Amino acid sequence: MEKLIDFKLVFTEIPKLLEYLPTTLLITFVSMIIGLIIGLLLAVIKINKIPVLSQIAAVFVSFIRGTPIIVQLYLTYYGIPIVLKYINYYQHTNLSVNAIPSLAFVLLAFALNESAYNSENIRAALLSVDKGEIEAARSLGMNQWQVLKRVTIPFATVVALPTLGNAFIGLMKNTSLAFVASVVDLTAEGQIIAGSNYRYFEIYLSLSIIYWILTIITERILKVLENRLTIFERAAELGLDTVQDSRLFNPFVRNKKSIVSGEVAR
Amino acid sequence: MIKIENLTKKYNRQTIFQDFNLEIATGEVVGIIGPSGAGKSTLLRCLNLLELPDEGKITIGDDTYVAPKVSVKDKIQFRQNSSMVFQQFNLFRQKNVLDNVTEGLITVKHLKRTEAEKIAKDEIENVNLTEHINKYPSQLSGGQKQRVGIARALAMHANTLLLDEPTSALDTELVDEVLSTIKEVIEKNEDQTVVIISHELSFIQDVATRVIFFDDGKIIEDGTPDQVFNNSKNERTKQFLQRYNRKSLVTK
Ligand SMILES: Nc1ncnc2c1ncn2[C@@H]1O[C@H](COP(=O)(O)OP(=O)(O)OP(=O)(O)O)[C@@H](O)[C@H]1O
Ligand SMILES: [Mg+2]
């Protein structure tokens, strides 16, 4: 009888799959960044109750939250060509769908999806910033943009980081739907390999291992980031006068007090 | 020099000031006293444009602000004529003491970091916090926090210092250290115009060159500390002082 499960294959196919890791990471990072920027815009629109725009934003967020991501991907994939044809017809332009890489459809769909989900978190985080600090910044003579950059966003980042981190991890896994727009990412490559050797189970096991490890690494990085960003409120508890020892931010170093008191050699 | 002409300020339909006038000479130390809701904070916040007046003219130094129309740029420019010390300190919690003080110098005045730090260190020294320079606000006592607030305000080198109840959020045992810091700061720079709102009447009597008793958006009494505290002929002032003196006797 043929081997039921080829365990060796689970690992030997990993390097081949990893060739497509950059695509997965690219989609994740680019959509996240665009999603954060649009999400911030949506949040600012909502906070300032800008007429018309805030109603449009509300409908957009509700629509994105109310529909599955795979449906949104298909909508973008089939919708953009229609929009282009429409523009070509009425504006007498000659825009070609083929000139747009399919990756762009995927990035757009994921970025819009992220922006809708992030906008609520960003809004709540922006609102949690101390009004007194904003006033102090204004009274020093900062303009609105400087206040946003120097006071509001830094604090909102700390507040939003855990939720945005989860969103990032969620997005990383959701990018496995990119095949819908015929983009070859980790999962799509897995499907291609499995389609030729019929070892579906093994390949999906390899994929799960890769995604799992990616998630664990991301969680670790987020933890380091969180430790670093919250040092201002933990400084007393850590007994810090100056924050210089990088090991204080290292999540693998447990006994931070001993670093401070110099018990652990530098 | 501060000159307020025909100031009108409303919150929604509630009028706080109507055709209000006040002139303060350079170097004066003005103590503002008065009951809660009198409009003391509103007046200070109008001087710093944290609240925008509805009508009137405010001059600080050579700079005149004419309400209500003004460009964002002019507003920001005008704001830099005065610096503010807040009741709740309002320190930047994510920045250590040094960065709290350099923040305005770097972001607003565009000084180089080294220059900003030099100025900041001087001011931090003036409020006796040099040994805490690298601490975060979460590591400081209320009194220390407020002294950082004072250093941050002074570092901007505006000629007018505005203090809105700088000690009323502090535990009683921390009030004196902040008051004595304020006193030192006032004595150190005689050209600086200071407007301070406080319920610490004996402190006001001690440091102010002029005391204004305020009620209902109007100046009820305006004179030297001795005139207002010891020889007031005004019934409302006397009542207010009696109540506060009794209060401070009880707390002591
Ligand atoms: N942002 C605001 N919106 C609406 N009303 C306000 C606002 N700020 C102050 N007021 C009202 O304006 C009046 C004057 O307030 P203000 O804070 O200037 O008084 P104050 O003399 O500083 O009192 P206190 O001693 O309690 O600080 C009060 O009736 C207050 O309720
Ligand atoms: Mg007040």
Image: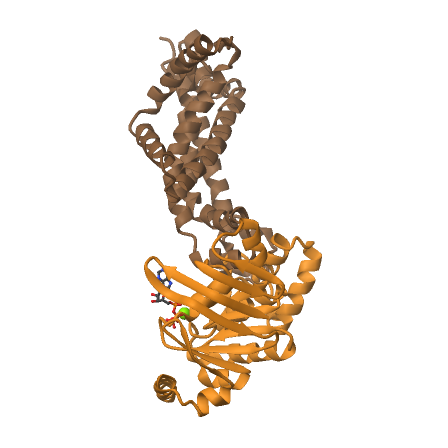
Answer yes or no: is residue B190 visible. Answer: yes
Answer yes or no: is residue A239 visible. Answer: no
Figure check: A175 above or below B208: above
Q: Is residue B18 left or right of residue A101?
A: left
Tell me what residue is drawn at x 41 percent, y 22 percent.
A176
Figure check: A187 above or below A171: above
Which one of the lettered chains is coloured brown? A
Tell me what residue is drawn at x 47 percent, y 20 percent.
A186
Which one of the lettered chains is coloured orange? B
Figure check: B213 above or below B7: below
Point out the image quarter for the C terminus of chain A: bottom right
Residue A19: quadrant of the picture: top right
**For this rendering, which residue is in front, B158 or A179?**
B158
**For this rendering, which residue is in front, B215 or B192?**
B215
Name the spot of residue B235 as percent of width and height, x first: 35, 87
Furthest residue in direction bottom, as rendered = B231
Q: Is residue A207 left or right of residue A262?
A: left
Name the spot of residue B102 as percent of width and height, x first: 62, 59
Figure check: B34 above or below A98: below
**For this rendering, which residue is in front, B44 or B94?**
B44
Name the spot of residue B130 as percent of width and height, x first: 62, 70
Furthest residue in direction left, as rendered = A66
Judged from the image, the quadrant occupied by ligand 1 is: bottom left
**For this rendering, which residue is in front, A120 or A197?**
A120
Point out the image quarter for the N terminus of chain A: top left
Tell me what residue is drawn at x 37 percent, y 46 percent.
A124
